[in-house]
Image (spheres, rainbow, N blue to C red):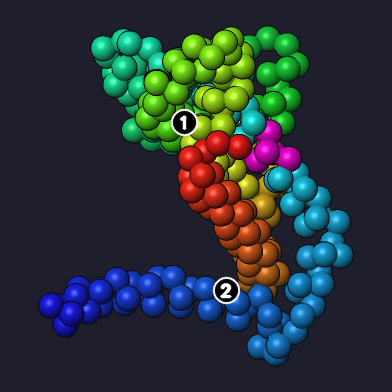
Amino acid sequence: MSFSRKCLGIPYGVFLIFFVAAPLLVLIYYAFTNGQGQFTASNLQNFFTDPNTLGTLCYSLVLALTATVVCLLIAYPVAYILAQSRIKKKAVILLLFIMPMWINFTLRITALKEILSVIEGNLAYHPFINTIIGMTYDFLPFMILPLYTTLSKLDRSVIEAASDLGADNFQTFIKIILPLSVPGIVSGVSMVFLPAMTNYVVLDMLYNSTYIMGSLIGSYFSAYDWHNGSMIALILLVIICIVTLVSGENESENAGRGGLV
């Protein structure tokens, strides 16, 4: 039995070696070498001394945080209403939020761009606002799904007990519902924030700019500067790993104590 299990794990191990470990080693090699193949830390130094890269990193963080907050503010009431309602066709309504994900991404953003172009006023033509609208439209289902899953599993008896003990609706939400939904919030934030950091397609299609990390990395590789491009990609990978570990630890801690904070 143990032998058969090891055999079943061989394809997975081969996949990890060729498609995860090998590309990562190539990325590290180019990040810490120069054009002559010599080891150097100048690429790392260039990242922290170049105002362009630091400005792009800060802008990407602000953009990702804003898109995440907007998605959370919209998704939480939607997920809560769907989870707590007694509508028999809740799955159909939830499906309406997921259906746009089945349509080609480029077509969706192109359609959104056309809608924004016909809206009168300067607000619709502001690049930052356009990008937030595009990212919210793209990532909103990823925020709704984990929130709906968590909120739909809430024990109604706990909510009823809070009401019986004299808590009003606001107190029940703040002290019971919101703490219990923290795991869903953490999952949704992770699923939106991490891809928003590097999703340059939305910004390129709506604004045609390189002021996001994904576009900046692409511009370095397009200019055949694989070394600085690899270093930026490696630093971004480290940031994403840190965010993932922190969010994972918080989710495990909240799950371990029942989500009550």
Q: Secondary structure at mark 2?
A: helix
User: Alpha-carbon neighbours of circle 2 within 10 Å: few (<14), some, or many (≥20)?
Assistant: some
Q: Is residue 248 left or right of residue 150?
A: right
In the figure, is residue 181 to the left or right of 17? Answer: right
Q: Against 26, is 258 above or below?
A: above
**Quadrant in which residue 73 is drawn:** top right
- Residue 254 place in picture, x, y as percent: 54, 44
Q: Position of residue 78 (x, y in %)?
A: 48, 18
Dot 1: what SS? helix
Residue beneath disc 1: 147
Q: Main secondary structure of the magenta part?
A: helix
Give the left or right position of residue 81, taking residue 194 as reference: left
* Amino acid bearing label 2: Leu
Q: What stretch of residues is rendered in magenta?
A: 62-67
Residue sitting at x 49%, y 48%: 256
Q: 79 or 58, which lies in front? A: 79
Between the C-alphas of marks 1 and 2, the distance is: 35 Å
> Quarter of the image holding residue 201?
top right
46 shown above or below 38? above
Mark 2, residue position: 27
Count the marks: 2
Badge 1 density bin: few <14, some 14–19, many ≥20, Cα 10 Å: many
Task: Work out whether 105 lies above or below 112.
Answer: below
Amino acid at circle 1: Leu
- Residue drawn where x is 31% and y is 10% of the image: 87
The foreground one among 40 and 156 is 156
